[in-house]
Image (cartoon, grey):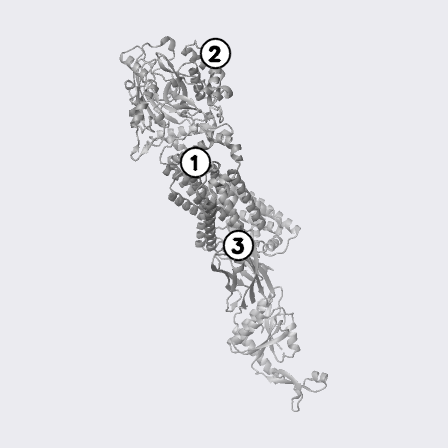
Amino acid sequence: MKRIRNIVRYAIFFALNIYIMFVFHSYVNFILLVGMTLVPLLSLFSTWRLSKEIGIAFRLPKESMKKGEEFNIYVELKNPLRLPLVNAYIKIKFSNPFYGEENIITLNVPIRAQKTMEYSYTVMMEYCGRVLVEAESIKLVGLLGIYEVTRKVDAQGECLIYPNGEPRNQEAGQTYMRGVTEAMESKEKGYDFSEVSDIREYIPGDKLQNIHWKLSMKKDELMVKERVSVSAMQLNVLVDLVNDEEMRLEAVLELADSITSSFVLQNLPFTVYYYSVNRAELCSCYIGSEIERHQWLELLLYDSGNVKAGYTEDLFIRQNLNEGTYLYIGYDDGSADENAIFGRQRTAATLRS
Amino acid sequence: MFKKNKKQKKHKEDVCLMKGMYLKEDKVSTKQILFTGCLRSLIVFCVVFGSVGGFLSAFNIEYNYLLVVFFYLLLSVYASILYTAPKLWHRDSFYILFFAAFVGAIYVFRVHANSGLYEIINAVLNYAKQFFNLSGVIEYDVQIDNPYLTVTILAIFVGMMEILVLNVWIYVTMGIGWTVFISFPILLVPLYMKLSPDLFYIFILGAGYLAVMVYKANGHYVSFAGDTSTRAAGLKKNRILYTQDFKGFRSILLFIILSSFLIAVIAGNIMSPARLDRQFKSDELRDSTSEIIGNVVMLGFGALFNSYSSTGGMSDGMLGGISNIRPDNQPDLIVSYTPYSNEAVYLKGFTGGEYGDNQWLDLYPHVYSKTIYGPNGPIINEKEVEEDQPIFEKESMKAEADSLKKDYENNAEYGAKGRMDIKNVGASVHYLYYPYYTTLPDYSVYGRNYNLTVGIDMWQEASYTYYPKQIWGNIGENKPSDIDASQIDDVFLEVPDKNREVIAKECESIGLNANMSENEIANAVSLYFEENIPYTLRPGATPRGEDFINYFLTKNRKGFCAHFASAATLIFRQMGIPARYVEGYVFSMETALASDENETKNYDDYYDGYSDLGESTVLDVEVTDAMAHAWVEIYVPDFGWRVVEVTPGSAEETDEDDFWSAFSRALNDRMEETVGNTGGNTLSQIRLSNLSWMLYAVLGLFAALCLFMLGKMTIRKVKRYKSCHQKDEREALIACYANICDMERMCNEEFYLCGSHLEQLKLFAAKYQQAFDLKNICEIIERVSFSRQGIEAEEYEMTMSCINELKRAIYHNANMLLKLRLLLR
């Protein structure tokens, strides 16, 4: 519409100028007429040339950002020509694959002559995830607003936004100790505090308690669960990545961040379980240091938070990984007792067995 | 839900890029705003300098470029930076400050500006005279004969006004239409006369126009103080626009200027103005309009309606251009004299000998030709002065004056000698304004003393000795014997060929014949005019191509003194009586009697000899421009030149009786009275009556300011009305609610403390005793404000009704002052 308005406006003044020139035999209007003829050509040429030469790139922070922190997104436009433009419209897709959110925004900037321009935009992310910024196309508008060229561009940048949970050392430490103690007690009662690493055929001498009876029935031969002994001073942590309309997953992540960082701070090793939508399986990570924790969070954020409610825990139990006591971090369905660690939006970290 | 709303409220100022991601709005730095403003002012400068400079260059009028450029740039930047003021009242205050400075500057340089204007008008008229082949175009007198200076000053003033007006449009709409409308019409004048501005100005103007077009086409021209560097566009806010980018602006502007320069150079080289003109075979515009435009040039725009005005005073023998007279009643002369009879006093100024081209030619071609200035002042041509001497004596009736002087010295019965001091306070400086039968020194004395203009300079006083002829009303019977009379020339008997037929017919109509005496003919003509041709100050202008006298006698049949005197002069000549057309000032005995008595002056110093009135007193008579008059002098053998009054008395109401004239007079009188009461004005060069224009300027300024405020208020009200009645019910509801909040804030400062809609509504409910569903209304307002959920028609109706009730309640509860503020907001 604006383009049509510009064309109409230009046409009116062009016609008016010609009229005055003819009526008055006006030299002024003759010069203006020459200008009004050449300028659109110049505008057309400069727009066309720029569309061939212009380059675009994004720069986002390489270091990890906490959610709620402001950071800059830099848009770099490189114009090697001496031709400026008032308006360039860059179609940019902002997305957060973790939540499956995306939006297309058109960014309007001027193009200066023979210059690499860097426009910075201060943004703030309220949710965790991976911010992906991709330029889809750039539309260059001629000086007179009546000629436009759109060109596909390929430029992208990304940045991870981590949860900003505050360490809750005391609560986390107590929970850890309680969890480990319960696991030890379970072992004493006959529970084995080891992990199943493989299933193989029975070899004489194997413990009877290691026989996988169900599978043996199916296969009609004795199958044995091969166990890898795990230290008794370790806790399993199950993070349930379920989201809802109220974005409670943010609170879950925040709580998980708080608790896991507290564990690491107190040198309490743990294995964290979560369901990976991308890999379609329950994943686990042994975490004994902050680097490992950071790597786990990175893996988590590259994944997706759209897991069905209760699915992770079911899978966890189904795979018999719930031997002993584990720490469940997720929505509080009312079962959390006073020993649980509570997060925002009715989330809690509860020891379950 | 509530928390969600809170979150959205938190990011109200930010732009949502996607769910959970917000672009933070940052304020543009003052430096950025100022620099952008300065660049924007360049557009205004280019357009104004291109148009004003182009106009002057087209007419080859010289002026000081540097000074004009300096002032234009200064004001452009000033006007532009006004828009960067953080608050609206700051801008308004600085506008008022500018107006005050402008009025002050105009007052200080008023004479320069006037002279500059007349210089320009004269230059235009000179070209127009050649272009339209006109005769009788009036040239304006300039008080300061330094066109370089005066034109520069005028160009600065004109440009200042243009800049101020244009700046508003550039900032508000960047409208090319308004820009052209404000700047281009001035160039149509030279363009019509096939004159072209210098290429440089065309380039400057073109660059300005191009910049306006480019920025209008691309947006980004609306920016004010406190702006953000980006702005979300549209309801969905899916576009982020930059607002002020100084470097981008600079880059574009440089590109535009460079392109315009190249285009101007290329176009200038491929075509010259003359060559362009030759390309056109027909010239329909000029063919069809030159008649009308020529009339306009000659008579002013009034020619379109046949109503060109003169402001009174003498016309210097120029006749055709005046259609009506609106005297300003300002004094032109101050005459100190002693009355000696009841007859009106005639002060002779201009004497016309030859008639042609709708004007009376002066008897002194040398004197009234253009003054030539050398490095040491005016150049006096002794030979020309000598040649003019006998003519000067004939005009001033030296022979008659000498004869009467002799009578007085010989103690003749009616012999008398008078003295008249005449001070020029507003009349043309080209004339002497002497009473009849004055013994004047040699013409060469005036020639040397008065800068080659045989007149009384402004604020100068001339003292004349005259010998009154007491019985000039009765030539036939009481003609004094042995009077010496001036020699007459053939020119006083000339009737132009084009007038002969009309004049002869008129003589026949009057009933004149060769047997009648001069006295009888004069009486017959006066009587005929009195009975047949009405006097009017609004006779209408003589159309272009028509002869002034022929048109008056055959078609128009109405006129003022110049018409009657001109026609009568030719009638007398047709009848063989030498006659000449005279202009000057006349004041009656009534005027004299109403004047101030000058007790410091002695009667004996001013009059001696026979007097109809006996010994009287010295009076200071203020002779206004309304007393300027034209009459006829006829030559009676053995008697000399005598005055014949042929202008009938006026029966119509004069223009001075209209409201504004009366107001003006009252104002002047009042001001002078006030000054008189407080001891008088010590600045002798400034007449306080002339200060009244300042009051007009202030009143005009005030009126303009009122109009401006009224306009702004109307725009605000229209905008508010539109936003409250828009189709989008959600937006309309928000606008209406914001409106009552604004109203309440004006009435109640406590309202500022309310932090939420609920608190605001609670305050409304408590203060205005309104019974409405507080919770529900609050929920609806919060919903439309912070979410994208729709609103039911029923909810809309209910909320709007509640808002309207509150609006009425706020208004009715406000006191008178607040009511006024609410109305004017």
The part of the image, by quadrant, that contains residue B376 is top left
Mark 1: few, some, or many residues within 10 Å (few <14, many ≥20)?
A: few
- Dot label at residue A45: 3
Which label is found at residue B697? 1
- Give the label on residue B511, or none: 2
For the N terminus of chain B, the quadrant is bottom right
Viewer-side residue, B94 vs A279: A279
Amino acid beneath label 1: Ala
Q: Chain of mark 1?
A: B
Q: Position of residue B58 (x, y in %)?
A: 44, 39
* C-alpha distance separating marks 1 and 2: 55 Å
- Mark 3 vs mark 2: same chain? no
Q: Is residue B606 above or below residue A169?
A: above
Label 3 marks which chain's residue?
A
Q: Position of residue B115 (x, y in %)?
A: 39, 34
Q: Is residue B186 left or right of residue B115?
A: right
B580 is higher (above) or lower (below) than B236 = above
Please state which amino acid type lies under the numbered disc 3: Phe
The answer to whether residue B667 is above or below residue B177 is above
Q: Is residue B569 visible?
A: yes
Q: CA distance from mark 1 to mark 3?
A: 53 Å
